[in-house]
Amino acid sequence: MSVDKLIPMKGRVTKVVDEAPLVRTYHIVVNGFPTPLPGQFDVLYVKGMGEVVISISNYAAGDRSLVEHTVRAVGAVTNYIYTNVGVGSYLGIRGPYGRGWPIREFEGHDVLVIGGGIGLAPLRALIKHIAENRSLYGHFILLYGARRPVDMLFKYEYEEYSKIPNSTILFSIDIPHTGWKGYVGFVTDLIDRVKFNPQNTVAFVCGPEVMMKVAADKLVKKGVKEDRVFLSLERRCRCGIGICGTCQLGHYFICKDGPVFSYQDVKQYVTVRGL
Amino acid sequence: MSRMLGEYFEGSVLLLENLILALKEQGLRVLSYKLEGDLPVIGEVSRLSDLLIDYTDIQSPGSYRLAKEVKGVFRHTQYSPKHLLHYPTQVIYEISDDFEIIRTKDDFPPSVLFGIKPCDLAAIEVLDKVLERDDVYQARRARIEYIVVEECVEPGGTCFCGSIGTGPAVAKGYDIAYARLGDQVLFKVGSEKGLKLVEKVGLTPASDETLRRYNEALNEARRKASRIPPFNVVVRALEDVAVAEGFWREASARCVGCTNCNMVCPTCFCTEFSDYADLSGKAWRERHWFGCLSFTYGQVAGQHFRPELFMRYRHFVLHKFLFYQRQVGLPGCVGCGRCITWCPMGIDLREVVSRAVGYVGR
C-alpha cells in the first residue's frame, strides 16, 4: 500500500521557451492528464532529485494533454531542471492541485489582474480564459511589473493581450532602463493610474507576498470588497493534497484550500509576521 | 439476563489475560505498550505479563523514568498509536532508470490497540480526520479491529487531559474500556463487538461498590489532570496573544528547535519527503515525520516564511489549540503531556498556555 496520490505520471518535455534570465517555460506532454483550471498547480518530479511545486501557466486538454510550467532556477530541483532538462527529457508530474482563480463565480464582473515578476505565470491561463470568453467578463485590466524589462515573462504574447477588446494593459519596471517607455516604480503604483469601478471589480493578484498585501490594501481602500480580492499564496508545499502539513498558514493548507484565497479569508494570517 | 451496551462489568486483573487471548484466537495481532529490552515502546504483546502492568512511569518536564513496581500505575511512553498508524518512515515508491515506478507494499496485519489511553484515543480521532486523504494511514486504520482503552485512575506528572476534556475517561470510539482499581478491573463496553468479547471472557456485572470506587477514582483523576485553565479559556487567550511577538519570544526563549515535541506528539502528522539514488541508477522517495520546530519548516527556495524560532514555536502552540479546531473541529492537543516530558529543555506547555491567560501584551 502506498500513497497512490503521490505517484507521478510520466511526462515528456516537447518544447522549452526562454522567458527571462533563469526562467524557462517547459511544455510537457502527459497522456491522459486531467484538465486543470487557471490558477491550479502541479508537482514536477526529477528522478532521484526531488519534487517541486509549479503553477500551471498554460494547458491544452486532450488525450495527449499538454501542460506548460514556467520555472525559475532558484532551488535544487529548479536549478537541475534549468540546467539539464530539455526537449525529450522525462519528468514526473502529478496534479492538477488546489483551488484556482474563481473565474465562474465572477462572470459578469470587471476583472483587474495584477502580476509581479514570476507571478504572471499562474495568471497567464486566467488571461487566456478571459480573452477566449470575452463576452463573459466586463472591462479587463492587466497591470504587470518586473524588476527589468528583460525579466518580464511571456513577452511574445503581449501583442495578443493588447488585442483583447475593452481592456487596459499597463507595464512597470522597478529599475530605470534606457528605451523603456512605460512606468518606472512599483506595479502597485499602477492601481492609481487606471480607472475601474470598485463595486463591480474582482481582482486577481499574484507576485511577491509583500506586493500582494500592498495591492490588496490599496484595492480595499479604493472600495473593492475584501472578498473580491484574490491572492495566490506560496508556502513550503510538498504533497499537494493536504496530508504532509508543511504548507500550513494558520488553519489553511495552501495546497488544498488554496493556493488562491480571498483577502478576506487570509488577512488575519498574512498580516502577522512569520505566522 | 441479557447484557447491554453501556453496561459495566468487573473482574480480576488476570481477566485482561483472557481478553488478550480471546483477541489472539481471532487471529489478531495485539499491540500495546511494552518493554523492548529496557526501552518502553508500543508493539506486539502475547500475554498480560508483556504489558507494563507492574511498572510506573515517572514523568516531569524534561524527564522520564520507568520504575518496576507491583501494581504500578502506567500511563504512556514517548511512543503513541501514531507510531503504528502513521509510521515514521515510509518508502513511497522506487523508480528505475527508465522511469518505471515500483510501488511499495505495506503489510499491516489485522490488529488490536490494547491498553492505549484516553488521550491516545482522542489523538486517533484527530489523525483520522486530518489524514483523511492519506491512503497508507487509512489502510492501516481500517485494519484496527478493536480498540481497548485503559482509563486513567491516576494522571502522570505532566498530564492535563482533564482541562482539555480528552480524559481520564472515554465516552466513545472504543470497543472495550477498562480501569484498574487495585486487583479489580472495571470494564465498560462501547460496541457490539466489544460486548461479544466481554461475554466470551466471562465477566460479571459490576457491583455498586466497584462502580462507586470507579467514579470516585475517575473524578479524582479528572480533578488532578486539570492543570491548565479550561480549554475554551486558553483558546480565547491564545487568540489574543497570537500577534504579541514578545509573548512568543519569551515562551520559546529556552527552545532549541530539536522537534522532540513534534515527534512524541500523538497528533503531530507533518511529513517531509526525501529522495535517494544509488549508483545502480535506482532511486526512491521516502516520506518521514517532520516537525514545525525544525529550522526548515516554512523555508522555500529563495525565502523563509518562519525564519525565527519563536514563529515556529508559536505555530506549534497555535496549531494545537486554535488551528486543529478550525481544521477538523477537535482540539489538536489531547493533554498527554509528552511534549513536556520529552522536551530536553523541560519547557512546560502548561505553563506557556496558562501564562497566555491574562497576558498583557507588548
Image (cartoon, coloured by chain):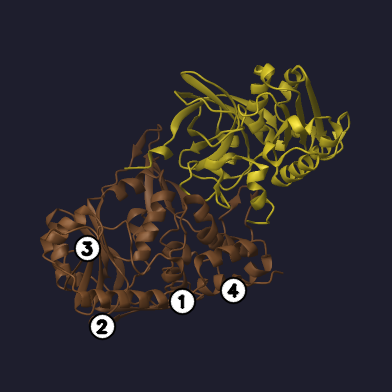
Tell me: residue B114, above or below residue B108: below
Residue B255 seen in the figure: no
Q: Are the residues tagged 3 and 1 within 8 Å (C-beta)?
A: no
* Mark nearer the viewer, 2 or 1: 2
Would you name the residue on which mark 1 appears?
A: B62
Crowdedness near tag 1: few (<14), some (14–19) or many (≥20) residues, C-alpha within 10 Å = some
Q: Chain of mark 2?
A: B
Instruction: Indicate the quadrant containing the N terminus of chain B: top left, top right, bottom left or bottom right.
Output: bottom left
Would you name the residue on which mark 3 appears?
A: B7
Q: Is B141 situated left or right of A69 in this image?
A: left
The CA span between labels 1 and 4 is: 19 Å
Tell me: residue A272, above or below residue A100: below
Question: What colour has chain A?
Answer: yellow
Whichever of callouts 1 and 4 sits on the residue coming sooner in the sequence is 1
Tag 2's secondary structure?
Answer: loop
Q: Are marks 1 and 4 on the same chain?
A: yes
The CA span between labels 4 and 3 is: 42 Å
Q: Chain of mark 1?
A: B
The CA span between labels 4 and 2 is: 36 Å
Label placed on residue B355 = 4
Q: Which chain is brown?
A: B
Whichever of callouts 2 and 1 sits on the residue coming sooner in the sequence is 1
The x, y position of residue A57, in whole percent, is 61, 29
